[in-house]
Amino acid sequence: MRLLSCSPPERKMLITRFFSRSLEAMEKALRADIYLLGAPGSCPHQVEQPEKDPLIALRYSCIYWVEHLCNSQLDSNTTYNDSLQDGGLVETFLRKKYLYWLEALSHCKTIQEGMGSITRLLNIVKRRHNATRLTSLVQDARQFINHHLLTIREAPLQLYSSALVFSPRENLIRNLFKEEIPDWIMHEPSHWHRYPQPCGSHQNRVNSVAISPDGSIAASGSDDETAILWSIETGELLRVLSDHSDRVYLVLFSPNGNVLASGSYDDTVRLWDVETGLCLRIVEVGNPFSEEVVFDQDQFHFTEIDDTSSLDCLRRRIGTYSRSSDDNGRSYCFDYDLNPACDWITLNGNNILCLPVFCGAWVSAVSGSAVVVGCVSGEIFIFRFDAKKLFKLPGFCS
């Protein structure tokens, strides 16, 4: 009421004060995992607010600080005129607290408003001649929330895993907060060339992925008529197997891992020496939908599959999970849950890492703590996780 009854200069002064106090309050209180959830897949609708909710006092500031900044119409007579210049209050806040602010908005179910706030902020700062660095930061902050909005809304703590991992290496927000990437992610995709950045890529959709029995090599088959071998340890491309003349729909390792079978729409199955990449044998086959390649020890044969089977069912059936044990003998199983809403890598049924929709995840293979994902765009993502550290997280079901 006081704000409505005061004069325009007084109103501007009060709004500016609201802005500065909002930033001050958030800088003091916002932090990673403010609700101490621990479990990385915790969803807002599953979260019980703590008895002493730290966001009660911060909710107004989180939602309205940018609006107050816009309405203050800072000028040379304003105490906070330097807020929007390089090194000012806004840049300092974003560099220190941006991810924690987004987490708070997600908990408050107002993350969409955050997108609008960053857009309004960008419209202000890009017109200022003394805010070049701040403008670049806000542009990257807007790109970050734009690409990861659905993930953040689904699970706030994925800000520190999925959103950071699946952001470009050059993104300023990723670089500012890269230390927040949890240590239970032992290996994340490297050799980042474009957005999203994979370990490497085919030129077209990946139809099948597999992991060697010893867990050291991954294989992928694609519509680009090639099969590729990758190092699980480093994500490095080891060799390209390129003798097929049509799409490769299946890759499969022999039990000893020495041979890779690749099935193609050119009506052949080719057997490759994994060590050398040489083609050992070419077998003429019929319709790939009617027969499945199966290894018996180190000899392969074909087995009929029923008429209701399809290539889509077949690829999702091969190597999608693997049960293992940690040093204490505790059983664990990583899996990859493909569904229309949100794709998750899981551990014993617990969501741990969300793959954003824009990745176009299509096929997966799992062995021990390694998860390999092939995408519609041709990209390959290789992850390794530390189950022991995940089991220690609060709220995690082992």
Image: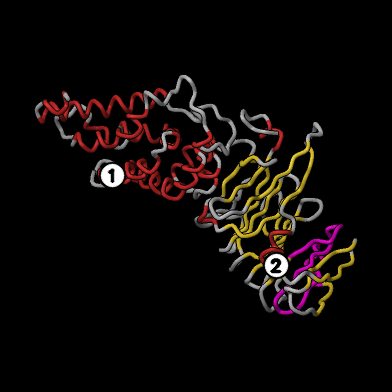
Give, as a three-letter code, the residue at label 2.
Answer: Ala
Q: Position of residue 195 (x, y in %)?
A: 50, 56
Read off the residue under disc 2: 227
Q: Position of residue 337 (x, y in %)?
A: 63, 50
- The residue drawn where x is 79% and y is 65% is 260
> Is 23 situated above or below 289?
above
Residue farthest toward the top in the current orientation of the protein: 52
Judge whether 286 appears above or below 341 on screen. below
The one nearer the camera, 50 or 98, is: 50
| Residue 31 picture location, percent across and down | 47, 28
| Residue 231 inside the magenta-drawn segment | no
Residue 201: percent from left, percent from top: 60, 62
Q: Residue furthest left?
A: 7
Residue numbers of the magenta segment: 251-279
Q: Residue 267 in magenta?
A: yes
Asked if 202 appears above or below 47 in the picture, the reply is below
- Alpha-carbon neighbours of circle 1 within 10 Å: few (<14), some, or many (≥20)? some
Q: Amino acid at mark 1?
A: Arg
Of the numbered discs 1 and 2, the one sitting upstream in the chain is 1
The numbered dot on residue 120 is: 1
Select label 1 or label 2 by which is in front.
Answer: 1
